[in-house]
């Protein structure tokens, strides 16, 4: 018999947020129903020989919306993967892409395995077979559906996907754009690995720059000196905390990983912690100067300015929401706060910067990678030297007209042409700032919208609906 569900499912939570926002858009019910529905769900089971035996692997690919193509979204490897979760994640991807003006529909993949239990060779076998299944059903391709990394996967898995795709479709000129998040030397792009975490930092920086919004929380503007607690030090959590610390002068006071949580009032140096973890058989516990907390979940209840849940969904629920003491929750993970918990947190005056905006840095840079693959050229190749020469000529003219010379140090900064990494970071920062201000505008103008998530949904729904309306499908 199926176990009774103690909490609302992830998909129910996402859809209940949608329902909360929908009345603010004034869109017709039929159009809203079309936007909300998952367009295609592909559930598969395939055999893979592990050791002497065959294992039947359960996997999914969900394309939530075809209003723009290709569809796009990461692939998750986790023992907890199920259809509801993949549908919820695909749904979030549609809204996320709209919010950051990435012209894709939303999708997501999931393979129900715990990667820790397999060797790299076995993981490679599973990944290649999963890709072959996607190819067989036309669920992957640069103009069809483009996967990327998510929980439990990274650039290594993306390289295997690319190689498998190439071996089936090597003649396709744009084949490299069939997947993003690839290693840089395998048609990837500089700055993709850190992109989601860096996007979280840019978003926090933009939020914190607003004096009035910070004053409402009893905080001074700016990130410097603010305290942060982080759940999950994987790709997103590591870069979000490291970049906030290095470039924003944020103090990381609490960190939780699989093995437990640690607290250090005067700040945890993230890089030192990662080195310590490597030496300490993969555990953060016992990090010099830190206290070990009773449970890894305690990170969610620590008194801090910014809480960054960067592990999995459904972490802050109706049973622990009232214990959260952070002033700002930066949803680096997808769906860490349930809809029920959100009601409690908002009553407490906590600001939630929603997942579908704050973790969109990954898909933004994935979009840049896909564009690079289609153009078959790295960003900056055409203009870098031209710009350098132009800056040089300007500097020379200034020196000639003023009779003064610009110092060598200043010159080296002034005369630099942009490399790929500079352009990627600049495009990501612009996207995060611009999208936040679109959301904030809606939040400020619509007096009956009381939270940033609803405002973000309204932004997304307005953009997606205009695509459908311009097609003349919903007159
Ligand atoms: P990851 O696998 O690199 O890291 C997740 C980390 O969380 C792991 O180190 C794991 O040990 C840890 N963890 C798991 N359960 C935990 C718990 N209960 N307490 C503390 N730590 C725990 O995954 P990721 O790519 O960083 O993804 C994390 C979240 O961010 C997911 O919700 C994912 O959907 C979302 N996300 C990822 C990306 C991306 O580009 N990778 C983009 C957008 C959103």
Image (cartoon, rainbow, N blue to C red):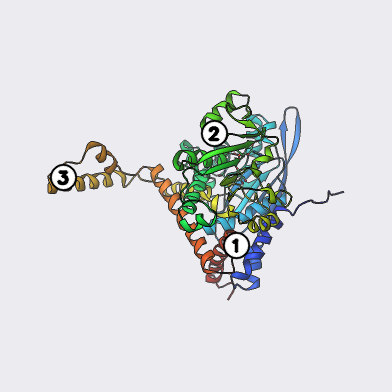
Q: Residue pushed farthest front?
A: 218
Mark 3: secondary structure: helix
Mark 1 Cβ inside 8 Å of ligand 1: no
> Does the CB distance between marks 2 and 1 fall below 8 Å?
no
Using a 10 Å C-alpha cutoff, classify the residue at mark 3 as few (fewer than 14 neighbours), some (14 to 19) or many (20 or more).
few
Using a 10 Å C-alpha cutoff, classify the residue at mark 2 as few (fewer than 14 neighbours), some (14 to 19) or many (20 or more).
many
Residue 399 numbered tag: 3
Mark 1: secondary structure: helix
**Earlier along the polypeptide chain: callout 3 or callout 1?**
3
| Alpha carbon separation for disc pair 3 and 1 | 54 Å
Residue 268 numbered tag: 2
| Alpha carbon separation for disc pair 3 and 2 | 47 Å
> Does the CB distance between marks 3 and 2 fall below 8 Å?
no
Residue 265 found in image quarter: top right
Residue 344 found in image quarter: bottom right
Q: Could you tell me residue 67's position as x and y percent?
A: 57, 62
């Amino acid at each position: 018999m199926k176990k009774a569900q103690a909490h609302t499912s992830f998909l129910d939570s996402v859809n209940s947020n949608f329902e909360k926002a929908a009345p603010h858009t004034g869109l017709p019910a039929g159009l809203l129903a079309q936007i909300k529905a998952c367009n295609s769900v592909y559930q598969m089971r395939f055999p893979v020989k592990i050791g002497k035996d065959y294992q039947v692997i359960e996997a999914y690919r969900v394309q939530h919306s075809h209003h723009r193509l290709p569809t796009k979204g990461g692939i998750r490897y986790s023992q907890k993967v199920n259809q509801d979760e993949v549908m919820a994640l695909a749904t979030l991807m549609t809204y996320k892409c709209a919010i950051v003006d990435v012209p894709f529909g939303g999708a997501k993949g999931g393979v129900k395995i715990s990667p820790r239990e397999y060797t790299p060779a076995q993981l490679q076998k599973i990944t290649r077979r999963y890709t072959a299944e996607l190819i067989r059903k036309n669920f992957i391709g640069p103009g069809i559906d483009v996967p990327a990394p998510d929980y439990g996967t990274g650039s290594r898995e993306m390289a295997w996907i690319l190689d498998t795709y190439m071996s089936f479709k090597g003649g396709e000129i744009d084949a490299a754009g069939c997947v993003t998040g690839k290693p840089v030397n395998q048609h990837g792009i500089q700055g993709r690995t850190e992109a989601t975490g860096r996007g979280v930092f840019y978003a926090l920086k933009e939020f914190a720059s607003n004096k009035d919004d910070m004053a409402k929380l009893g905080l001074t503007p700016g990130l410097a000196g603010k305290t942060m607690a982080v759940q999950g030090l994987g790709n997103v959590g590591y870069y979000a905390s490291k970049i906030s610390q290095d470039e924003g002068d944020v103090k990381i006071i609490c960190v939780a990983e699989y093995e437990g949580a640690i607290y250090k009032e005067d700040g945890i140096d993230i890089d030192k912690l990662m080195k310590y973890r490597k030496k300490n058989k993969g555990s953060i516990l016992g990090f010099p100067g830190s206290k070990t907390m009773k449970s890894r979940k305690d990170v969610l209840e620590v008194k801090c300015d910014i809480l960054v849940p960067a592990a999995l969904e459904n972490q802050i629920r109706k049973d622990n929401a009232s214990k959260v003491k952070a002033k700002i929750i930066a949803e680096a993970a997808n769906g860490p706060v349930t809809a029920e918990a959100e009601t409690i947190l908002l009553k407490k005056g906590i600001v939630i910067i929603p997942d579908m905006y704050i973790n969109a840095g990954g898909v933004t840079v994935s979009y840049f990678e896909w564009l690079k693959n289609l153009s078959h050229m790295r960003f900056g190749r055409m203009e870098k030297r031209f710009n350098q020469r132009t800056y040089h000529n300007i500097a020379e003219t200034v020196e000639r007209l003023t009779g003064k010379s610009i110092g060598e140090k200043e010159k080296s900064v002034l005369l630099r042409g942009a490399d790929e990494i500079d352009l990627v970071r600049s495009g990501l920062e612009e996207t995060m700032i611009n999208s936040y201000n679109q959301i904030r505008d809606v939040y400020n103008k619509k007096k009956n919208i009381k939270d940033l998530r609803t405002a973000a949904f309204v932004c997304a729904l307005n953009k997606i609906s205009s695509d459908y309306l311009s097609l003349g499908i919903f007159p």
